[in-house]
Image (spheres, rainbow, N blue to C red):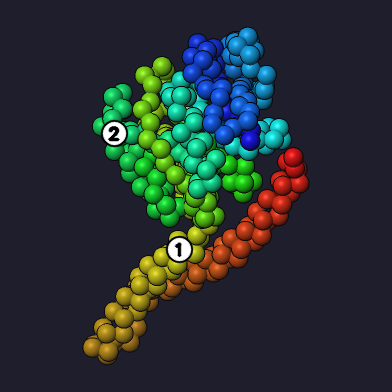
Amino acid sequence: MKVFIQIPCLNEELTLPAVLASIPHVIDDVDEVEILVVDDGSTDRTVEVAQALGVTHFVRHSRNMGLARSFRDGIDYALAHGADIVVNTDGDNQYPQDRIPDLVRPIVDGWAEIVIADRQTATIEHFSPFKKLMQRVGSRVVSGAADTDMPDAASGFRAYSRSSLLRLNIVTDFSYTMETIIQAGHKRLRIESVPVVTNAKTRESRLFKNIFHHMFKSASAITRSYLMYKPYVIFATLTVVFGVLALIPFVRFVVLWAGSGVQGGHVQSLVFGSIMAVAALLSLALGVLSDLQRVNRVLLEDQLERIKELQYRR
């Protein structure tokens, strides 16, 4: 069994040595442990430092492509080189690499396909109370969208089995963390959580400008991923809401017309009701079309999984 530990890096020459030094090279029931550095357009000596410390596997971007693309390209490389399990950590040394065997163990034992480290964000000192609240709310939203229970959905310290990676498809350009959980939940992949204690903060996050930027990007990724797998829920809700808003003025018009007997009055109720009725019909039509598109996506993803099996055949 071969485990690839991939480290996405962007100008991490100062912290990368500590990361590499703390990665275990021997894991029970694992034959090979390989380290992969994904250089996302670094302008410092990140690659040179990694090479000097014995790293031989690299994926290099000529310019910054983002965390999601780095993750996807690293996964492609690892699968092409025979990875049975891929562990993702970070180049800023925020994660305790010595816990990698604990992330890998549920997959090796065969009772999980994805294992995510729970950073226990409520205990992280440099997180503000607002950020802790948003992390908790975000994890609950993702858990609800994925029909699973993840205490720390934003954690990037995680392990994936080969079979799960063949079934997952990254389409976002921001962060893969939310998207892969929602996909895995709807594809009935078993996800487990392992509590860890993070290392001291080494630098500010480069993934987002501030907490509000992160919230906006995360919300966009969650919404898009949810629409990919349950579009009928959104459009059915809109159909019901617009239908009720159409029914109320229609009923009002009938009651007032029957009570007064005056024809031609209260036309505004008919106009507003008609607009809402059209909106309800449009929502219904979009719901039917999006659900048909969802079925088509499922078929395409099944074909893509088979193509990956052939592409990454050992």
Q: Considering only order in the chain, which callout, 2 or 1, is on the residue closer to the N terminus?
A: 2
Q: Nearer the viewer, mark 1 or mark 2?
A: 2
Query: In percent of the image, x 50 and y 25: which residue is there?
Result: 90
Q: Residue at x 63, y 25 (%)?
A: 34
Residue 29: numbered disc:
none
> Which structural element holds mark 1?
helix
User: Hey, what amino acid is under mark 2?
Assistant: Ala
Image position of 221 (left or right of 1)? left
Q: Residue farthest to the front?
A: 29
In this rendering, is residue 137 above or below 272? Answer: above
Residue 47, image quadrant? top right
Which quarter shows the N terminus?
Answer: top right
Residue positioned most to the left: 259
Which of the labelled discs sits on residue 122, or is there none?
A: 2
Q: Which residue carries the number 1 mark?
A: 233
Q: Can I make out residue 223 in this image?
A: yes
Which residue is nearer to you in this view: 36 or 172?
36
Quadrant of the image containing the C terminus:
top right
Q: Position of residue 186 (x, y in %)?
A: 51, 55
Q: How many marks?
A: 2
Crowdedness near tag 1: few (<14), some (14–19) or many (≥20) residues, C-alpha within 10 Å? some
In the image, residue 123 sits, relative to residue 91, either above or below, namely: below
